[in-house]
Image: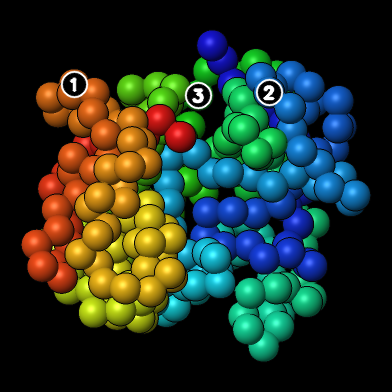
């Protein structure tokens, strides 16, 4: 199934963007109906994008953040790459109070996910195709996307969900592995598979850089208080389906989570896992 190309502009003023999340205004809102699923638009006619195949460090998940230097760097990269300048934030560094936004660009997407966010690859500038064109996204074209470039820079983890074509996934995986070998940005300090000690919530908000999916589950568990001892049972109870690509093994997220005392790690690299939701 081809992607649909939708032209429009990127919007951040009055919003809380991060390195893998930004608002988009379609030039023609009728184009949203070409995607599978319903796109949720706010009163300004803007859609919240979910950028396909990547996950950057969280800046405000359930009121918590990951180490902010790298989280902010990923956001800065998004703003610069999409041509947004002069962004000024509130004192908490979450809400954009002023920006030179409305910059032109386009997305390619096939569907909106359950929260109404178009799952998209984001591109800056003008597209040669017509608005609403059906597009077969090639690995070469993918490399022009913010998604790919964030991984290439070492500012985003590859994070795959069902439905992403294998050739596009493989292209992003190659960029991630190159960035890891070069120890670019987050890969210089990533502790996802080497493991990290969790003494309290600050261990993952301020100290250790880890896959955001794992961070989110730890925040959900630890914000209630207590120790990390029960974390394995917590993720097991959620029964989140995954596929381990190297073995084509259909299993659950808890099977790649290891907890020994207060030491936590994933047993698989991010690019070897496909999540269901």
Say which residue label 2 marks: 37
Q: Residue farthest to the top?
A: 1
Check disc 1 and report its element: helix, strand or loop.
loop
Q: Nearer the viewer, residue 162 or 224?
A: 224
x, y (%) of residue 105?
Answer: 70, 45
Check disc 2 and report its element: helix, strand or loop.
loop
Query: Considering only order in the chain, which callout, 3 or 1, is on the residue closer to the N terminus?
Result: 3
Q: Using residue 215 as the reference point, say whether residue 191 is left or right of it.
A: left
Answer yes or no: is residue 264 visible. Answer: yes
For the N terminus, the quadrant is top right
Say which residue label 3 marks: 137
Give the image quarter of residue 148.
top left
Give the image quarter of residue 103.
bottom right
Q: Measuring 33% from the left and 22% from the top, which residue is drawn there?
A: 166
Q: Measuring 26% from the left and 58% from the top, which residue is drawn there?
A: 231
In the picture, the disc for residue 248 is 1
x, y (%) of residue 252?
Answer: 27, 34
Check disc 3 and report its element: helix, strand or loop.
loop
Q: Residue farthest to the right?
A: 43
Rounded to the nearest angstrom, the CA distance separating label 2 from label 3 is: 20 Å
């Amino acid at each position: 199934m081809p992607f649909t190309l939708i032209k429009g502009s990127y919007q951040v003023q009055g919003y809380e963007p991060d390195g893998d999340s930004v608002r988009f205004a379609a030039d023609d809102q009728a184009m949203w109906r070409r995607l599978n699923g319903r796109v949720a638009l706010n009163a300004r006619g803007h859609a919240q994008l979910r950028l396909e195949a990547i996950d950057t460090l969280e800046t405000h998940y359930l009121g918590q953040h990951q180490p902010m230097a790298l989280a902010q760097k990923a956001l800065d990269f998004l703003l610069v790459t999409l041509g947004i300048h002069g962004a000024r934030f509130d004192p908490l560094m979450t809400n954009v109070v002023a920006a030179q936004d409305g910059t032109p660009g386009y997305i390619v997407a096939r569907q909106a996910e359950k929260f109404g966010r178009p799952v998209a690859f984001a591109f800056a500038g003008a597209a040669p195709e017509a608005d609403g064109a059906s597009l077969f996204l090639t690995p070469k074209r993918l490399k022009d996307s913010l998604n790919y470039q964030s991984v290439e820079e070492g500012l985003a983890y590859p994070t795959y969900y069902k439905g992403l074509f294998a050739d596009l996934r493989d292209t992003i995986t190659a960029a991630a592995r190159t960035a890891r070998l070069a120890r670019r940005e987050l890969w210089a300090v990533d502790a996802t598979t080497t493991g990290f000690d969790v003494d309290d919530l600050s261990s993952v908000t301020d100290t250790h850089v880890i896959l955001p999916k794992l961070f989110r589950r730890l925040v959900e568990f630890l914000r209630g208080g207590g120790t990390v001892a029960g974390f394995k049972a917590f993720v097991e109870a959620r029964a989140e389906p995954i596929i381990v690509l190297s073995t084509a093994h259909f299993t659950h997220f808890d099977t790649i989570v290891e907890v020994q005392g207060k030491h936590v790690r994933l047993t698989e690299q991010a690019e070897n896992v496909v999540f269901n939701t």
